[in-house]
Amino acid sequence: MKSILMVLATLAAALVAPEPAVAAPIPNDAPAALIPADPTPEQVGRALARIARDSHGRVRTGTVGRTNEGRPIRLATVGHGPTRLLYVTQQHGDEPLGTPAAVRALWTLGVPDTPWHRWLRGRVTIDVVVQANPDGAARDQRYNHDPSATGEYAEPGVGYDINRYHNPLTPIADNPVPESVAILRLWRATRPSVVVDYHMQGRYVQPDGRETTASVLWPTSPLAPESTRSKQLVVHNVERTTAIAGANVTRYPGGDYEGIARNAYGILGSASMLLELSSIPDVEFQIRTAFVSMLATAQGAADGSLWRTDAARADSIPARGPFIPPAEADAA
């Protein structure tokens, strides 16, 4: 895996801020042992505490709620600029790779203190809900933990699918999912310009034989307003993760239901995007893809290049391709 130093140097070359003139970023790599690829909630807590300490408070940590088992729903924030961004990882407890990517991004943006870092932190404030479903993560399951869960988006005796309970039309008092409620309340408190939700998917192949490594989508609910800014966000991420991380990015075939985070926060007015990392064997490659997405989104929001992207290019992102059955994937 290329070093984080190389990633940021490439980002600096690709995304030149028109003002102010700042030095190119020269951060140190995040420590290799900072967090594992599939961390427990306790490991996430320790990693965030270390980052808060090593950054001398430039990364602020806290909680936005508690799960049904009392685990903290962790929030980390870096920057103090006027443009707010919100990243969410691991709503589905068995989809972990966005979480180590977020921890590394927080370290990389908060611990070094070069002129570039100070410039970026003065332009944006990035809130990260790190491992939004800690009860599910502890059990390696998609759902949260709620044995009383019932309804269309629940697994009886197990819990709720958190990513179906962001419906902005549902009163928060009627929402039975504490993790979704916490994210909705955070959105209402911060009104972010950008929301990116990080997930994982199976394995898929393109007609030319290349395997999809990630898929993206913007809000598709008919209740969402005009989608230009969300499509700009998507195209910006596709271009940067392709050029810098080497990702092969396709269009995710997502639904229109307004309770899905991608749709809900688009309805509320944010530029909103889903990024799904494929379950390929090269875990470090996928963590790096999400890491590049997080840094490229932050810099694009800081220097304005995010909003100079051609939204029309979103419509040419290829479809995800057919599913690779596990037996075939294992043999590949």
Image (cartoon, helix red, strand yellow):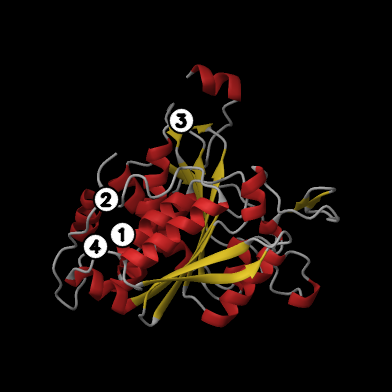
Give the alpha-carbon distance from disc 3 to disc 2, as whole Å.
21 Å
Q: Quadrant of residue 286?
A: top left
- Residue labelled with disc 1: 108
Percent of width and height locating residue 210: 42, 30
**N-terminal of the two: label 1 or label 4?**
4
**N-terminal of the two: label 3 or label 2?**
2
Give the alpha-carbon distance from disc 4 to disc 2, as whole Å.
16 Å
Q: Secondary structure at mark 3?
A: loop
Mark 1, other Cα within 10 Å: few <14 / some 14–19 / many ≥20: many
Kind of residue at disc 1: Thr
Horizontal side, residue 266 vs residue 4: left or right: right
Disc 3, disc 1: CB below 8 Å? no
Q: Residue at x 36, y 80 (%)?
A: 80
Residue 234 can be seen in this image: no
Q: How many marks?
A: 4
- Residue labelled with disc 4: 15
Task: Identify the disc placed on residue 281.
Answer: 3
Disc 1, disc 4: CB below 8 Å? no
Mark 2, other Cα within 10 Å: few <14 / some 14–19 / many ≥20: many
Q: Is residue 205 depicted above or below 158 in this figure?
A: above
**N-terminal of the two: label 4 or label 2?**
2
Q: Secondary structure at mark 4?
A: loop
Disc 4, disc 2: CB below 8 Å? no
Give the alpha-carbon distance from disc 3 to disc 4, as whole Å.
30 Å
Give the alpha-carbon distance from disc 1 to disc 2, as whole Å.
8 Å
- Residue labelled with disc 2: 4
Percent of width and height locating residue 332: 47, 19
Kind of residue at disc 2: Ile
Task: Identify the disc placed on residue 309.
Answer: none
Kind of residue at disc 4: Leu
